[in-house]
Amino acid sequence: MGRGAPGCRGMRFTPTRRQISRVNRCNCMEALLNEWLWKDEYWLPPGIRWQDVTLSEDEGRFPLPRDLVYTLPLALAFIAVRYVFERVIAVPLSRHLGVKDRIRIRAASVPKLETFYKQNSRQPSQTEVVSLGKQCGLSQRQIHTWFRHRRNQDRPSNTKKFCEASWRFVFYLASFTAGLASLINTPWFWDQTECWRGFPNQPVSKPHFWYYVLELGFYLSLLLCVSVDVKRKDFKEQVIHHIATISLIGFSYCANYVRVGTLVMLVHDSSDFLLESAKLFHYAGWTRLCDSLFVIFAAVFLVTRLVVFPGKVIHTTLVVSLDFFEPFFGYYFFNVLLLVLQVLHVFWAYLILRMVYKFMFMGKVERDERSDEESEVEDEDEDPEEEGDECSWEQRKGAINSKLASLANNCVLNNLANQRNLNSRLPKAR
């Protein structure tokens, strides 16, 4: 083979103008990122530059932003695994545990009302009801009935909510167990001062790397599925929580706040799987076990989110860290995200404490304050007399029976209260 033949080691390569232009553009983009995004003062304490952050190969790996590229395919993989899990495992499990879906009457096919429902409002005003009645030739009562049935028709079934809760329960339990096993022997688990010793030259072990990447991928999958999941009363707070969590995990990894980040994730996972387990048995109608798990969850939540998280985690990032470096942009940004999470913790703790207050001092809990309830007011009340021939007597009886069952499961902790006797109220409801 001659010297100038393809594949020769001594071949001399002359780049084309297009290749040179492409390389120049890449260099310009890299220079722009280094100049604006990866500025030393944004990510590192004063007096430290990226060139100073060096780790030998035997010490471990230093977290790099490009590692987060794995999170997007992981999020898509989580969505695919969840799809299979819910249909192969969660649905049969729900039937085995006795999860029952309410029998809901389907709204009659009225194209004008359907168009208004989808494009305008799910709850029309009185003026709109009158206008729709004239257009469709229906009475106001029939219009109200149609919209009530249509709203109930869109409500997620208990099986769907059970499947979602079971998927989150499996992940949170596995994540908490693996996270605790990887952190129990680390020095910063017991002494939070160690989170900053040697910062930012702190190696990241493989277990903590995968702990980070999997958690970030999971929360990204939750954010991608938020539009199709069950919409709850704290929907906006959940979206803010997911965005703040993703930003917190991503930024803390790039800035090598991994030690603190692992503690944040562990604190959250410690109570999340308890809440999801309580939801599972709530949907299955195992009220006594559900109430017991919820009591445990409430205690763990209040201790970890209102005591441990601000007293240990936020204190070490906000106060203790100043013993090791001066404040910089990353310090403020990281602590702002932590404080946003703490505000959400206070909001959810308020819902829990309000429910406990009603139970302890009023002897009742009017509504379930947990986040597994939908954001809208229940529209399950049906009037059999106004349905005519739309449904059979069996469907009506099933709807009434489902209402009676919901009365028995309407509040949390009802099995722990001796002040209420639902059995004496059921005949009145009938």
Image (cartoon, rainbow, N blue to C red):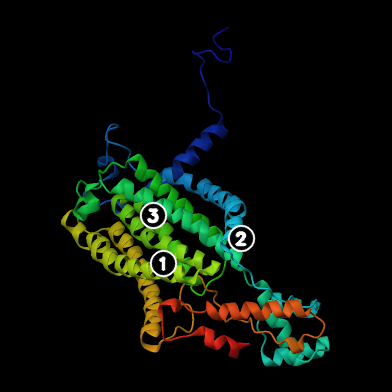
Q: Residue drawn at (36%, 84%), measured in percent from left and top?
A: 360
Q: Are marks 3 and 1 in contact (CB under 8 Å)?
A: no
The x, y position of residue 140, in whole percent, is 74, 92
If you read the primary sequence from the N terminus, does the residue marked by circle 3 or circle 1 appear first? 3
The residue at which mark 1 appears reads as 293
SS category of the residue bearing label 3: helix
Residue 293 appears left or right of 131: left
Image quadrant in which you'd find residue 28: top left
Residue 325 appears left or right of 213: left
Residue 244 appears left or right of 221: left
The x, y position of residue 292, in whole percent, is 40, 69
SS category of the residue bearing label 2: helix
The x, y position of residue 428, in whole percent, is 59, 91
Q: Quadrant of the C terminus?
A: bottom right
Marks 1 and 2 sit apart, C-alpha to C-alpha, by 21 Å
Residue 249's disc number: 3
Q: Residue drawn at (51%, 84%), measured in percent from left and top?
A: 422
User: Relative to 196, does residue 423 appear above or below in the rendering?
Assistant: below
The residue under label 3 is which amino acid type? Ile
